[in-house]
Image (tube, rainbow, N blue to C red):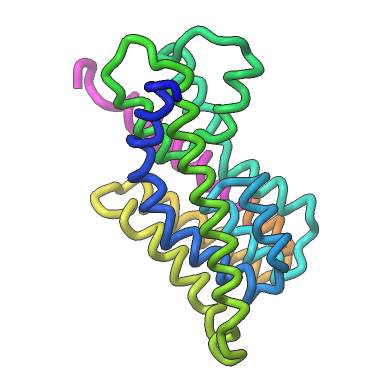
């Protein structure tokens, strides 16, 4: 077996361990949200995007139009374009279709492992090693979580719906600590979404989509103007 691939598996094992509770919980919540084992596993196979998958569960339970779910997922994951573009110059020269394969597996965690690799050019087998173990663990733990959820008592399955919102809070709060930009982004998005919710001007799917895009634009404009107002050299 290629030594670079083995090194990738080794370095990516920490991602697999970290994915264990998150993917397990996703599988469990997917079951309580009404998804079958095949549907939940397929989502992890083809979407492979933690936060976006959790968000999709919320939209699915509210019977949001599938097109809106896809659009919301696209907006949440648009950062992946930037991550893969950033890594492109650091990776070993390779055919585009091969880069396209491992680019599918570039998540925030995989990006961190590859971006911090102290090599002029990262070997393609190493990237595949990192991606394969992370991707496999996410899919397998999703399936295991669903099976566990299917064997829970009915009252616990119903109660797990609350855990979905707790998971979102758990994902958001750590990133808000010491980061005013994230705090501002979250608050503005929440206010915009709440406005559309209480006025019923937009459906749930469109409300989340508009709130996400609007808050991002507003925050970037505020910070761009703030940066321009600073004296040169600051």
Name the image quarter holding residue 116: top left
From this viewpoint, is residue 213 visible? no
Query: Where 3 falls versus 154 (above or below)?
Result: above
Residue in the image at 47% along x and 43% along y: 134
Residue in the image at 56% along x and 60% along y: 142
Q: Judge left or right: residue 1 versus residue 34.
A: left
On the image, the x and y values in percent for residue 4 come to 39, 22
Label total for image = 0
Between 212 and 196, the one lying in front of the other is 212
The magenta segment: 210-234
Between 58 and 130, the one lying in front of the other is 130
From this viewpoint, is residue 16 visible? yes
On the image, the x and y values in percent for residue 204 come to 69, 64
Residue in the image at 57% along x and 71% along y: 29
Any magenta on residue 95? Answer: no
Q: Judge left or right: residue 85 versus residue 97.
A: left
Between 144 and 228, the one lying in front of the other is 144
Query: Where 30 falls versus 98 (above or below)?
Result: below
Q: Quadrant of the N terminus?
A: top left
On the image, the x and y values in percent for residue 162 come to 51, 79
Predominant secondary structure, magenta span: helix
């Amino acid at each position: 077996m290629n030594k670079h691939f083995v090194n990738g598996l080794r370095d990516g094992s920490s991602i697999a361990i970290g994915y264990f509770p998150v993917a397990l919980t996703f599988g469990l919540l997917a079951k309580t949200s009404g998804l079958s084992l095949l549907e939940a596993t397929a989502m992890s196979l083809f979407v492979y995007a933690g936060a976006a998958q959790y968000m999709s569960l919320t939209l699915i339970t509210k019977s949001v139009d599938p097109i809106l779910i896809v659009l919301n997922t696209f907006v949440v994951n648009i950062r992946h374009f930037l991550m893969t573009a950033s890594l492109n110059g650091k990776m070993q020269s390779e055919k585009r279709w091969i880069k396209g394969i491992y680019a599918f597996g570039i998540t925030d965690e995989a990006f961190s492992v590859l971006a911090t690799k102290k090599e002029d050019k990262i070997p393609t087998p190493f990237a595949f090693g990192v991606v394969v173990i992370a991707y496999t663990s996410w899919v397998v733990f999703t399936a295991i979580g669903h099976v566990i959820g299917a064997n829970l008592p009915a009252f616990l399955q119903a109660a797990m719906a609350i855990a979905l919102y707790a998971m979102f809070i758990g994902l958001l709060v750590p990133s808000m600590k010491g980061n005013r930009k994230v705090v501002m982004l979250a608050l503005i998005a929440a206010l915009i979404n709440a406005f559309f919710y209480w006025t019923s001007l937009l459906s749930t799917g469109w409300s989340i989509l508009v709130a996400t895009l609007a808050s991002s634009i507003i925050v970037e404009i505020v910070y761009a103007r703030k940066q321009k107002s600073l004296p040169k050299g600051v």
